[in-house]
Image (cartoon, rainbow, N blue to C red):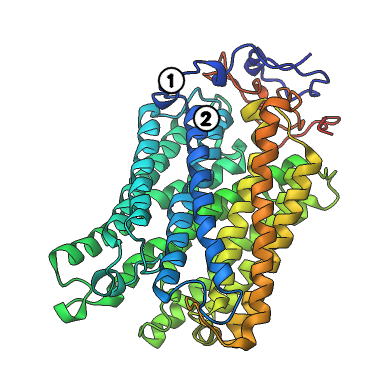
């Protein structure tokens, strides 16, 4: 029999997936079709779809600025853009990608959709606040878009002073307001997740029966709540100094520009984990589901998420080895930066151990999981170089930093995001996509990403500084490789949009559990009903407890 919502009331372990799945008669997507029903919805699943559409738009917009940057760097002479326009291009690329895509991408879309389903709840703890968080995000993103329309921002995405307070005549205040406002969206989302995970778990769903996806989002939510107010206050101080000529960061007015760096990186290094920790949670689910077994060292992987969240708040100073801090402070921050790599390594080694002797299925989500492990490993290992004071001083403000940054935050986060989107797409839409097309896209993204950013490690080590629109001719070959890789990467990113949208009308019906996976989200229909479960489920099995004979029926 095919799975129905009524089956969610059972406490039995998962059974074989349906062979001839059918679409449920009632589900969250057909519970009202008008625009008003979507814009005023309190259903966490619909809000997740609103976020999905929003972050996808800003991903594409930020990607357009990246295209302009790579076109400029294909030749040594600054012959496409002026230096001012080049500054605005890479700045708006960074602001849009970091604050309006990478930070909200997984928590606001996959987290919003899945956490209530995974814990057996009918919705998040505060549905109205959840909808409010999307409107706040859109308001902040509108200010960011206003900054583009009024001439752009040229300070770099880090808003470093004195560029942002004195030197720049660009749209600093609208961009800063956009970042400030969108921060409240993150805070409200994190609060909603924490309360939901603490208070709304199904009977029998103890902490150590929770999916690792939930553990990762719990740790991420702690960072959102504790770290985001710091960057919000910092941005307010920048705006206040700019508008009212206060002496906070400007040394001519008695301020200290290094103070801004302390405040900014106290948030922004943990913000790296706001982006990549949810992706790690996704990869845990993909590896377990593809290997038909529990993640090796479940408890260690769960606690490593909390360890990353905690230690991440103590390593901000490694961004400031050349900012004049003392040798002793640099030594401490160097040690702590090496230390934060340990829980990340625990995850990578444990995923690898899970795959060992596992019945690994090679569906598209697993391709993305393996791609994540490859890219994140390169990003993590090069991060160790940056934790070493001497090497960091040598490569600071070079393309080595750009490459490392993108391997961790872009390669890791987007691989996790796309892997999760492909894994739970049947649950979200009730339809299957074309597996062959999806694997082609995964391969293009992995190959294109490495061709784009690996040459930049070499460029940085050889001394090419970042943020220059002209460079010596001896660096052209590596830059041409990087720009060629960006072309392949762009095709890889656009391709999923095509076949995923095509699947909405023409895809095969997925059924409740096309992967043969365990977890409460797979014990209701696809797409799920508005309130997820007819009755609160009862959990009597351990996390990732796969019975014999449960396999995927996805071709």
Disc count in the image?
Answer: 2
Residue 55, placed above or below residue 174? above
Visible residue check, residue 532: no
Q: CA distance from mark 1 to mark 2?
A: 21 Å
Residue at position x 40%, y 85% from top? 328
Q: Check contact, mark 1 vs mark 2: CB within 8 A.
A: no
Residue 224: x and y in percent read 40, 50
> Residue 368: x percent and y percent?
71, 50
Callout 2 secondary element: helix
Label 1 sits on residue: 37
Decide which of 197, 108 is in the foreground and name it: 108
What residue is shown with label 2? 116
Q: Position of residue 285 (x, y in %)?
A: 67, 42
Q: Which mark is residue 511?
A: none
The kind of secondary structure element at disc 1 is helix
Residue drawn 32% across the image and 49% down it: 143
Left/right of residue 470 with respect to residue 41 in the rendered view: right
Closer to the camera, 553 or 336? Answer: 553
Instruction: Judge whether 88 appears above or below 515 on screen.
Output: below
Horizontal relation, residue 404 to residue 43: left or right: right
**In screen coordinates, is 6 left or right of 545?**
left
| Crowd tier of the residue under label 2, counting other residues whose Cα lies within 10 Å: few below 14, some 14–19, many 20 or above | many
């Amino acid at each position: 029999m095919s799975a129905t919502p009524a089956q969610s009331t059972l406490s039995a372990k998962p059974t074989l997936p349906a062979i001839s799945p059918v679409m449920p008669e009632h589900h969250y997507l057909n519970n009202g079709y008008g625009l008003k029903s979507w814009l005023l919805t309190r259903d966490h699943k619909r809000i997740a779809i609103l976020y999905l559409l929003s972050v996808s738009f800003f991903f594409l917009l930020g990607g357009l600025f990246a295209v302009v940057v790579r076109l400029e760097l294909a030749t040594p002479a600054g012959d496409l853009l002026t230096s001012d326009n080049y500054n605005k291009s890479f700045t708006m690329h960074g602001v849009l990608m970091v604050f309006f895509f990478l930070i909200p991408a997984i928590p606001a879309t996959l987290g919003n959709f899945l956490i209530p389903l995974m814990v057996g709840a009918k919705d998040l703890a505060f549905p109205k606040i959840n909808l409010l968080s999307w409107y706040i995000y859109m308001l902040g993103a509108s200010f960011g878009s206003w900054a583009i329309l009024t001439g752009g921002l040229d300070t770099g995405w880090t808003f470093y002073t004195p560029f942002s307070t004195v030197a720049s005549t660009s749209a600093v205040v609208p961009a800063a307001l956009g970042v400030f406002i969108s921060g409240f969206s993150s805070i409200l989302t994190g609060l909603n997740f924490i309360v939901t995970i603490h208070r709304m778990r199904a009977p029998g769903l103890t902490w150590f029966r929770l999916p690792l996806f939930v553990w990762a989002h719990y740790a991420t939510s702690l960072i959102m709540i504790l770290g985001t107010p710091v960057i919000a206050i910092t941005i307010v101080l920048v705006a206040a100094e700019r508008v009212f000529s206060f002496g906070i960061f400007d040394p001519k007015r008695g301020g200290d520009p290094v103070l801004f760096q302390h405040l900014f990186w106290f948030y922004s290094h943990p913000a790296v984990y706001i982006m990549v920790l949810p992706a790690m949670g996704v990869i845990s689910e993909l590896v377990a589901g593809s290997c038909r077994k529990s993640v090796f060292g479940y408890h260690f992987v769960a606690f490593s998420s909390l360890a990353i969240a905690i230690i991440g708040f103590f390593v901000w100073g490694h961004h400031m080895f050349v900012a004049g801090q003392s040798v002793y402070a640099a030594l401490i921050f160097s040690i702590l930066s090496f230390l934060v790599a340990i829980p990340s390594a625990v995850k990578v080694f444990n995923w690898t151990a899970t795959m060992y002797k596992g019945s690994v299925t090679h569906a598209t989500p697993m391709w993305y999981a393996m791609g994540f492990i490859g890219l994140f490993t390169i990003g993590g290992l090069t991060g160790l170089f940056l934790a070493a004071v001497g090497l960091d001083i040598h490569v600071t403000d070079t393309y080595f930093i750009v490459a490392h940054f993108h391997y961790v935050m872009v390669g890791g986060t987007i691989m996790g995001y796309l892997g999760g989107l492909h894994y739970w797409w049947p649950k979200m839409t009730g339809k299957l996509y074309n597996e062959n097309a999806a694997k082609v896209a995964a391969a293009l993204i992995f190959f294109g990403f490495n061709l784009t950013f690996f040459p930049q490690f070499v460029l940085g080590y050889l001394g090419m500084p970042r943020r220059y629109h002209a460079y010596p001719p001896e660096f052209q070959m590596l830059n041409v490789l990087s720009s060629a890789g960006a072309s392949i990467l762009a095709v890889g990113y656009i391709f999923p949009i095509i076949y995923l949208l095509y699947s909405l009308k023409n895809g095969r019906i997925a059924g409740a559990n096309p992967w043969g996976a365990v977890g409460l989200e797979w014990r209701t229909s696809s797409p799920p009903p508005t309130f997820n479960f007819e009755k609160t489920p009862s959990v009597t099995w351990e996390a990732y407890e796969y019975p014999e004979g449960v396999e995927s029926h996805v071709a």
